[in-house]
Amino acid sequence: MAVIKIDPLDTLFFRDGRPFTMGEDDWAVSVFPPSPGVIYGALRSLYFSYHTEELSLAQTDADPTVSLRITAMYWLMGPPGSQYPYFPLPLDLVRRKNSRQEPDRYYRLELRSLNDVATGFSLPWVLGSGEEVENGDNCLVSKETLADYLAGNRDTFFAKEMKQYLYEESRIGIGRNTTTRAAEEHRLYRIKMHRLKEMSLAVEYEGLTLPGEGFLRLGGEGRVARYTHLSGDKEVLLAPVTGRYFKLYLATPAFFAAGWRPGWLNPDGAGAYGPLKIRLLTAAVGRPLYIGGFDIKEKRPKPMRRAAPPGSVYYCEILQGSMAEVVKAFHGRCIAEYRQKEGFGLAFVGKLDQKNLSTLASGGGDINAGDHYRRHLNVGKLSPGTSQYRRGLPVP
C-alpha cells in the first residue's frame, strides 16, 4: 500500500457530464473536485510514461496496470509542512438556513418516524429538523471531526467550504485547423479553471509501482502536477465494535445498480450482503453526479452513469450478523458496484448518536408541523421513477 500526494503546479480543468461541441457551444463547464476515475487514469498514464515500451499492452489481458486499485482518497489542507487530512462533510449534518453568525457550525438531523403518515415512501424513517436548515456547498471536515462523527460523539461540528481553497480563473481559447494550425471562425470558447491554494490531494493505492516523486499530467489540457510519496502510517478511522445500528458514510462517489441505493438492497430497504442481513432505515443522499470518462482503447466515451455523491449517509439496522462482520465488509472499503477499483464508493462505518438511538428504541420522533426536510436530502431523489416529494411529508 502506498500513499501519493499530488500538488498541481497550474490551473486545473475537469469537464462535467454535459456534452461540449466546439463551434456550437462557447462555454465549457468545469467541476471540482475531480472524480476518482480521473485520478485512476492519471496514475495509469504516469506508469506508461516511464514504461513506453509497454503502452501497446494497455487495456489488454497483459496490461501491467490491471492490478492498480485506489483504496482511499482525501484532501490535505493547510500550509506546506502542516497539512491535515480532510474528508467530505456527511450529508446528514446541516447548518441553520441563512445563518451569518455560525456559517461553519453544523448539526445532526434527527430521525422521524413515518408512522401514521400517508406516504408512498418505502422506508420507515426520514431525517428532519425543527427549524429551516441547509447543506453546505462542497464542504470538508477534518479527520478528527469525521472520527467524532463516526463515533457518535459531539452535537455540533465545524466544516470548511472548499471554495475557500480555490481560485477560479476563466480562459479563452479558439479552435485551430488540424492541418494549417490556423484559427477557425466560430470556434471561440471559454473554460473555467481552478487553482488550488494550500490544498493537496492524497491518494492511497496498491498494485502498481511508481517512482518516488516526479510529475504527472492531470485533467483537461494535461496540466502538470507534482507528486511525492508520503511516509508513515496510513490514515485510519476507527469503527464501532458493538451495536445493532450503524451508519454507512461514503467518502467518494458511488455507482450503485439501483441508483441512490446499493443494488443488494430491495426497494423496501431489506437485503443481504454475504452472510449479513441488513435493513436500510433512511438515508441522506445529495444530488446525483453524472460521471463518464473516455475509453482510450475503444476511442469513445464511457457510459454515463449517475453516482451517489460523496458525503451520502445510510442509516442501517443489522437483522442477522454482527457489527464485526459489518466492519469487515464495509469499513475502509470501496463498495461501488461499478468501477470499484478506481476508488468509487469508499465507505466508512459509523455509530449512531445517543439521541437517534433512543428515538429508534422508543419508536418515537413522529413528524410534527414544525419539521423541515431539505429537498436534496430526500432519498427518493436518486430513485428512478419516483417523485421528489412524497404525499404527507412536510415541505419547507
Image (tube, rainbow, N blue to C red):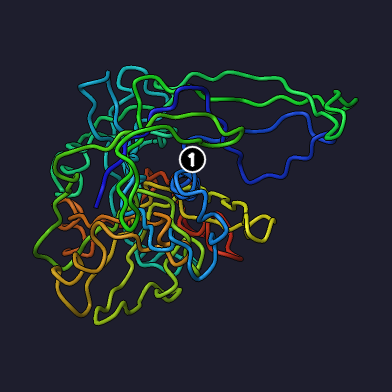
Give the image location of residue 50, x and y in percent: 44, 44
Give the image location of residue 81, x and y in percent: 21, 21
Quadrant housing residue 345: bottom left
User: Which residue corresponds to the image point at 52% horizontal and 23% vertical from the top-left?
Assistant: 11
As displayed, is residue 20 above or below residue 55?
above
Tell me if mark 1 has few (under 14), some (14-19) or many (20+) residues whose alpha carbon lies within 10 angstroms of its own. Answer: some
As displayed, is residue 1 above or below residue 84?
below
Give the image location of residue 196, x and y in percent: 43, 23
User: Which residue corresponds to the image point at 41% horizontal and 62% vertical from the top-left?
Assistant: 340
User: Which residue corresponds to the image point at 68% horizontal and 44% vertical from the top-left?
Assistant: 18
Identify the residue under disc 1. Answer: 34
Q: Nearer the viewer, residue 337 or 58?
A: 58
Q: Nearer the viewer, residue 82 or 139?
A: 82
Quadrant housing residue 164: top left
- Which residue type does callout 1 highlight? Pro
Q: Residue placed farthest to the left in the image?
A: 242
Looking at the image, residue 214 sits to the left or right of residue 390; the answer is left
Q: Nearer the viewer, residue 251 or 227?
A: 227
Give the image location of residue 376, x and y in percent: 48, 46
Looking at the image, residue 130 sits to the left or right of residue 66; the answer is left
Looking at the image, residue 117 sits to the left or right of residue 84; the answer is right
Q: Residue placed farthest to the front in the image?
A: 53
